[in-house]
Amino acid sequence: MNQKTILVTGGSGFIGSNLIRRIINYTDYSVVNIDKLTYSGNPESLIDIEDHPGYTFIQADICDREAVRKVFSMYSPRYIMNLAAESHVDRSIDGPDAFIQTNINGTFILLSEAYDYFKMLSPEDKDLFRFLHVSTDEVYGSLGDTGYFTEETPYDPRSPYSASKASSDHLVNAWYHTYGLPVLITNCSNNYGPYQYPEKLIPVIILNALKHKSIPLYGKGDNIRDWLFVDDHARALLSVLEKGKPGETYNIGGNNEKTNLEIVHAICDLLDEMKPLAGKSYRELITFVTDRPGHDKRYAIDASKIRRELGFSPAYTFETGIRTTVEWYLNNNNWCTAVLSNKYQLERLGKL
Ligand code: NAD
């Protein structure tokens, strides 16, 4: 086994690219990134480290058993971090097939190939191997005005996306209990930050505002999410990988509950400061649109376990994280143009 090698799946996406950048820039590990490069996976997101000797990219589908097997045998990784997924709730409403295929079948292929690989390791290497599965707080369903998701909250997914992620979490747990594969699961709240594909709330707001287009807000804008800056998520994942106990789940959150309206206001106010419009505020672009079908009301994470047991807490507040994010989108118009050069043009999806 190569003790310094981490196999990351979905590393060309939003969280994966931020994670790989952190691993390459701040640790001694090398990374093998398997990514199919769907619409949301972009090599441009890793252009600054693509020539680093510790980085290898393989374009492959995690559902392709032969390809996955070959990667395990060629690179003999110590760790695998599974981030490859279809990730957008609105798209899962319009076309759930790809979500079932990648999120459920793909995770199954990875687990079974990881187990075949694991069985052949020496006892010492078996102790070091970990399979970290990256999941979402959406598996827990929706909260009312009070309460928090803990690691013990029963699963109650509501969208095709969250149901497919919940299924994959159950498979990962099954490989621990049935086969003894040393797995870890993380359930994280909403992420934001650089390199997020411009179909999710925060980049859509920023890019629409910069084009002086209306800023769409679902329903009354009163849905609540708990926001985490993406680099804090990457740090949390590394701490679970190195210090987490096999078979355990860790919730990751930012302690930043905000309504969607609060998010839009914060971004408009930053844009008013950084790129002011003559005689008006970006807030005037806000337009309320019909709500998403089955839109969960509130998500909030109790992240006390990861803080208590692994000593992890976020470094960014919402104010520092959102400022960094808005600045990044203002300075990286080329990336936005490149990733939007295919079909998707910021139009509304998942309306039924
Ligand atoms: P993303 O859509 O930006 O990236 C997903 C990546 O997976 C892309 O690079 C894509 O090309 C790749 N991919 C998709 N299908 C694949 C396949 N069959 N084989 C190989 N690669 C494939 O998503 P993200 O926001 O970076 O999310 C990454 C992971 O984190 C997902 O598992 C998601 O469920 C989870 N998560 C995301 C958030 C969030 O707020 N974004 C929060 C919690 C958990």
Image (tube, grey):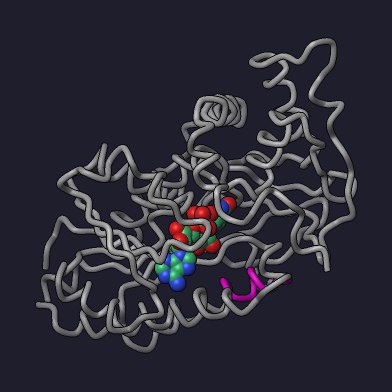
Q: Is residue 134 visible?
A: no
- Residue 147 drawn above or below residue 217: below
What x and y, as percent, mark residue 198? 61, 46
- Residue 29 drawn above or below residue 133: above
State yes or no: residue 163 in magenta. yes
Per the picture, the main secondary structure of the magenta-coloured stretch is: helix
Q: Please indicate whether residue 221 sits to the left or right of residue 119 in the image.
A: right
Residue at point 11%, 71% (across, down): 124
Q: Please indicate whether residue 284 sits to the left or right of residue 170 in the image.
A: right
Residue at point 71%, 66% (across, down): 141
What x and y, as percent, mark residue 304? 53, 49
Q: Please indicate whether residue 46 sits to the left or right of residue 290 in the image.
A: left
Q: Is residue 28 visible?
A: yes
Q: Nearer the viewer, residue 19 or 275?
A: 275
Question: Residue 72's image quarter?
Answer: bottom left
The C terminus is located in which quarter? Answer: bottom right
Question: Residue 152's image quarter?
Answer: bottom right
What x and y, as percent, mark residue 100? 57, 79
| Residues rendered magenta in the picture | 158-166
Q: Nearer the viewer, residue 189 or 151?
A: 189
- Residue 42 drawn above or below residue 257: below
Residue at point 12%, 63% (across, down): 2
The N terminus is located in which quarter? Answer: bottom left
Residue at point 89%, 43% (across, down): 288
- Residue 84 drawn above or below residue 224: below
Q: Nearer the viewer, residue 286 or 83?
A: 286
What x and y, as percent, mark residue 238? 34, 50
